Image (tube, grey):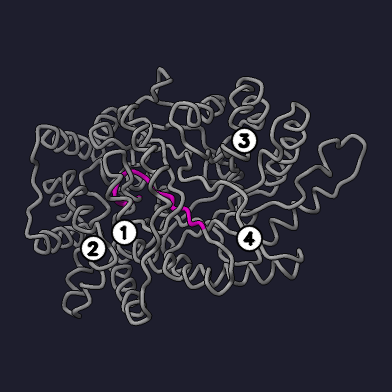
Amino acid sequence: MINRKIPATMVSQHPDHAGKPYWLDEEFISTHEETKECFLSFSDFGASEYKWDWEGKLVDESVIERLFSENYEFFKAKPLGYEKFLTFRLPNPKVETEFRLGRAFMGILSACALAKQVKLHTPPLFEVILPMTETAEEIIDIQEAFSELHALKHKLFGFVNGDLKHIEVIPLFEQAEIISRSDEIIKSYLILHKKRFGFTPAYLRPYIARSDPALNSGIVPTILALKLALSRYIKLENTSGVKLFPIVGTGSLPFRGGLTPEKIDNFLKEYKGIKTALLQSAFRYDYNKTQVIKAINKLEENLQKSDAIYIPKKDEENIRSVMNIFESFYKSTIEGIAPIVNKVAINLPKRRERVQHIGLFGYSRGIEGVRLPRAIGFTGALYSIGVPPEFIGTGRGISAVSKMESLPVVEKYYLNLTDDLKRAGRFLNKKVLRELAKKNSAWKMILEDVKEIEKYLGYEFTPLTNDDLLYQKLSIKIYNKIIGNENAGEEITKAAMLRKSMG
């Protein structure tokens, strides 16, 4: 029996918006303004959950005090931790400095005491997200660390030894291979949890990333890995008796998930079995506010009604083989395009305050030893010059698996494949891609991808609207400025506004 509400929508601080938030006079959202954003996500949009990101960004640590003091009556009517939810995304200790983890824990404990003191629902915070989860032991370590901090005793620590003794953890799986076998990690975790704490959790909310696995493996392997995970969760639920409520971390552009207010039906079709959808900044701020509210209401009402599609063992084996083929084409291309991608990404305007992912306080992510921007920067950079990353490795992959007669299994489980490729194709600039292909074999391989995809679709990518034509001009101008070592920030912003997402 699950005695809590499972949120259908989770608002995040991902800085992927192109335009101004409706409640601000500028595009940049400062750390101090994120508390207001959190409240407006609940009150204006009607979302159920807000993710407060401690991983790699600056944080307003007084979030609970501000929320309660400025919006007391709202949270009295819709209690935090019961009707609305604020969920901390922790730094992972294996890649980020541990002092940020301790500060997050102290914030959770003090929030419980504050809620009790002002006679609001407690605990207001009780669940955290652990990024880059790869083992069951990592999840247990977080819970043990919280338990030990809770056990601290001193007369000055009035907030310790309160109502929250055990923290719930949402494991975030970020690599395609790990996602596809994440049920094994969850199964191990349930066994370890019973051994360490004396009971088995009634439920778990596994969180499946969409951006980072696409960045590392390409779009097709990512979608297929997600489908494998959702299928395997069905069996794990049946054998363990533990309910699973999967979350997916979708952005607006197809490469990062394809969830926009205009594509709710596509999302509901593709992501059956998902119980919580991430709503990033572009979803909320690059579309009409009324349209956004309507879309969120539709997700709240319909997302949790559908069950995942079960994948039989024969298909699963075929899918894993297909994933490897697509991924090999994708990875073989990334090293060659990295210099241009990094050069464009530097020009992307900042939308939030982040700790730099280099040097003393951060980390960076790369592929096969190649350093690249994070997923938003990577996607935004490629879209800006008219080469959507959805195409990388996909055309050659389709050609290869078609010859193996395995293409039907891709089409069976990647339901929006055609639509996603056509959406991305609106922003393709063949002129820029041909110029790049003259200088570098990696771009030549992407040109081959495009040709194979057009052959597969029986459809030639070409501008169809005035906005499409304007986008073509902007992407050429951006490319020329980058090649000429000029700043292209203004043109990059205009192009992002047209596609309704920075990256």
Crowding at label 1, few (<14), some or many (≥20) Cα neighbours within 10 Å?
Answer: many
Crowding at label 3, few (<14), some or many (≥20) Cα neighbours within 10 Å?
Answer: many
Mark nearer the viewer, 1 or 3: 3
Count the labels in the image: 4
Q: Is residue 170 above or below residue 195?
A: above
Mark nearer the viewer, 2 or 4: 4
The C terminus: image quadrant:
top left
Kindly state the secondary structure of the residue where label 1 is placed.
helix
Q: Is residue 381 above or below residue 442?
A: above
Quarter where residue 259 is shown: top left
Which residue of the protein is positioned furthest toward the right in this rendering? 155
Queried whether the magenta region covers residue 255, the answer comes back as yes
What residue appears at the point 14 percent right and 55 percent down from the top-left corner? Answer: 438
> Residue under circle 4?
202
Identify the mark nearer the N-term, 1 or 4: 4
Q: Is residue 115 above or below residue 188?
A: above
Identify the mark nearer the N-term, 1 or 2: 1
Mark nearer the viewer, 3 or 2: 3
What residue appears at the point 52 percent right and 72 percent down from the top-left corner? Answer: 238
Q: Are marks 3 and 2 in contact (CB under 8 Å)?
A: no
> Residue under circle 3?
80
Label 1 to label 3, Cα distance in Å? 36 Å
Crowding at label 4, few (<14), some or many (≥20) Cα neighbours within 10 Å?
Answer: some
Identify the mark nearer the N-term, 1 or 3: 3
Kindly state the secondary structure of the residue where label 4 is placed.
loop
Specify the segment rendered in magenta: 245-256
The N terminus: image quadrant:
bottom right
> Residue under circle 2?
394
Kindly state the secondary structure of the residue where label 2 is placed.
helix
> Residue under circle 1?
219
